Amino acid sequence: MRAALLEDPAAPLVIGERAEPEPGEMALIEVRAAALNPVDVGIASGRFFAGRPPLPYVPGIEAAGAILESERFPAGTRVLACGSGLGVTRDGALAELATASDDVLIEIPDPADDVLAVALGTAGLAAWMPIAWRCPVRDSESVLILGATGTVGLLAVQIAKLLGAGRVLAVGRDAARLEKARMLGADEAVPLGDGFPIRLAEAAAIDPPTLVLDMLWGEPLEAAVSEVGRGARIVNVGQASVSDAEDGPPAAISSATLRAKRAELIGWSNFAAPVEALADGYERLLDHAAAARVRIDYETVALAEAPDAWQRLRAGGAPKLVVVT
C-alpha cells in the first residue's frame, strides 16, 4: 500500500510502499482522510511522553475511514480512529490502510463528511473535552485561552462562548489570528511578546479568569497563574511555547500563589479520557459544526503532497491540514 514514511526525524517524509497491516485482533480501516497534528511532530522528534515507533514508520495519530474488518462494527461503517498506539507505538494514519482497537473507535455520525470529521477529531476534542467535560464552563465565568491562535485555541474560544462563558480572553502571538479570535467570540485579545505580563494583568483585572485552557506552558502560564481568580481551574493540554526544547523548561509556578488562590492545575490528554465520553463530546461538537455554531478552517492535500504538508506543520503557523487518501 502507499504510505507516507518518516525515515529520519530531521528530514521530510517520503512517499513509498509499505506492507499492508495485519489486523490480528484489531479493526482494519480503509483510510479516507488523516489529520496532521502538532503532536505528530512531537512524536517524530521523540519528545512525546508515550514514545515513538521504531524508524521508519508511518506517522499520523488519527484517521477517518471505513471499516473493512471489525468484531464490533459492520463493514462500511465510518469511524474516527485514534488511540491504541496508532502513530505512537506503531504505524499511523498516513497510509491507505490502518488498524486500531475496536474499543477506541468512534462512529462518525451522518451527515459529517470524512474530512470535517477528522479535522474536528483530536483538535476538536482537545478544545471541547477540557472545558465541556473535565472542567465545564460555568455560567458567565471569565475564561482565558492561552494559545488562542492555534487550531485548538480558536475552537476553544468558540466553545467557551457557546457553553456560557461571560468573558473570553484570547492570548496568542499571531496578530491576524488574534483578530480572528475576536471575530469568533473573544472579548479581548492579548498579544504575547515583550510586556505580556503587564498587558495580561490589565485585561484580567476587569474580571479575573476562573477557567484557563493552556496550550503554551512556560512563561505565559506563569503570568496567567498570577492573574487568575480564586478557585480557578487551569487545564494544560500542551507546551507550544517551549516545543523547540527537548522537554521544555519548567514553568516557574508559585506554590504560594496556587494555594492562596485555591487554584487547581490539571493535565489533560485525550488519550486518557473514557471512549464513551469522547464519543459523546465528539457527536455534540459535530452537531455544533453542522449548525455553524463552531467553525474550523482546514486545508486538504493529497497523500502525494504529505511531505510538503509535514514541513509546513513543522514550521508552525499552517492551517489545519488534512491528508486525503
Image (cartoon, grey):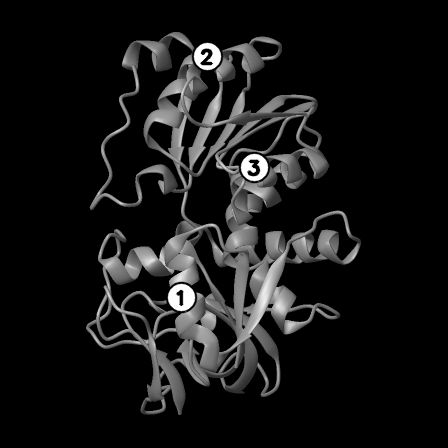
The amino acid marked with disc number 1 is Trp
Q: Residue, x 60% and y 60% (percent of image)?
A: 298
The amino acid marked with disc number 3 is Ile
The amino acid marked with disc number 2 is Ile
Helix or strand or loop: what does disc 3 sit on?
helix
Is 22 above or below relative to 129?
below
Name the residue nearer the viewer: 29 or 319: 319
Helix or strand or loop: what does disc 1 sit on?
helix
Local packing at callout 2 (Cα closer than 10 Å; few below 14, some 14-19, many 20+) is: few
Disc number for residue 254: none
**Left/right of residue 64 with respect to residue 24 in the rendered view:** right
Give the image location of residue 114, x and y in percent: 63, 72
**Left/right of residue 13 with respect to residue 273 in the rendered view:** left
How far, Cα to Cα, is label 3 from label 1? 29 Å
The disc, 3 or 1, on the residue closer to the chain's N-terminal end is 3
Viewer-nearest of discs 3 and 1: 1
Viewer-nearest of discs 2 and 3: 2
Q: Which residue is mark 3?
A: 131
Q: Which residue is mark 1?
A: 310
Q: Which residue is mark 2?
A: 198
How far, Cα to Cα, is label 2 from label 3? 26 Å
Q: Residue, x 40% and y 89% (percent of image)?
A: 2
